[in-house]
Amino acid sequence: KAGVTQTPRYLIKTRGQQVTLSCSPISGHRSVSWYQQTPGQGLQFLFEYFSETQRNKGNFPGRFSGRQFSNSRSEMNVSTLELGDSALYLCASSLISTAGGAYEQYFGPGTRLTVT
Amino acid sequence: DQQVKQNSPSLSVQEGRISILNCDYTNSMFDYFLWYKKYPAEGPTFLISISSIKDKNEDGRFTVFLNKSAKHLSLHIVPSQPGDSAVYFCAAKTRSGSARQLTFGSGTQLTVLP
């Protein structure tokens, strides 16, 4: 069974631009969560989507948004990029929603975003 | 306000010895705890977990201990192998309230020296 895939793997953007990252979950998984990883901060939860609905949201500004499609693939968008948005963005999938009780998540390799 | 803390950013251990990674949490509502391992250029992979109704869970060379009164958990790796060198994240969650998502610590870089 194929794992979680994320595209692109690496991205360089300029401050003020916007970016869209994509995540394809494991086949059959309906929940996709997004995390931001920065040095010293660990993984910070952005949001979770389950069955095309946002189920949970972390403490990030409204510049960070996402959506999920009917095939469970998810996209994350960051508008008006700031230098501090440079990070590894990870998505993780699970069979059911973590908000609904799922515990284990399966992570993709991440997208390394650099904002200059 | 970090609800899950890993106060040691790095740890070096000799091959064959025990590695002990520590994690503290502040939210008493957390009822499930997990450890993830992350190699460079890869996403974290699930390692081992423990429910709050238990104080120990073992899986091969990996054992997780939970001390609820101290709000502390630890991961023991015995014996440590060079392939265990990675960043280890502890994570916690609860089934209700605002912490239903996984809350991660900042990670500990483990280096096992041959």
Image (tube, coloured by chain):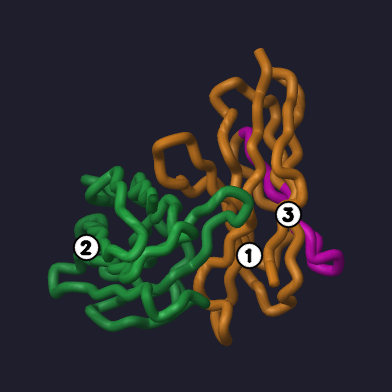
Residue drawn at (68%, 67%), measured in percent from left and top? B2
The kind of residue on which mark 3 rests is Cys
> In which quarter of the view is residue A85 placed?
bottom left
Residue drawn at (74%, 77%), measured in percent from left and top? B28
Give the label on residue B51, or none.
1
Q: Is residue B63 magenta?
A: yes
Q: CA distance from mark 2 to mark 3?
A: 33 Å
Residue hosting label 3? B23
The correct choice, above or below, for B61 with respect to B101 in the image is above
Q: Earlier in the sequence, mark 3 or mark 1?
A: 3
| Mark 3 element type | strand
Q: CA distance from mark 3 to mark 1?
A: 15 Å
Colour that chain A carries in the picture: green
Of badges 3 and 1, nearer the viewer stands: 3
Start and end of the magenta stretch? Answer: B61-74
Colour that chain B carries in the picture: orange
Indicate the position of residue A29 as horizontal and vertical percent values. Answer: 27, 64
Give the label on residue A28, or none.
2
> In which quarter of the view is residue B60 placed?
top right
Chain letter for the residue marked with disc 1 in the picture? B
Indicate the position of residue B49 as horizontal and vertical percent values. Answer: 58, 55
The correct choice, above or below, for A48 with respect to B66 in the image is below
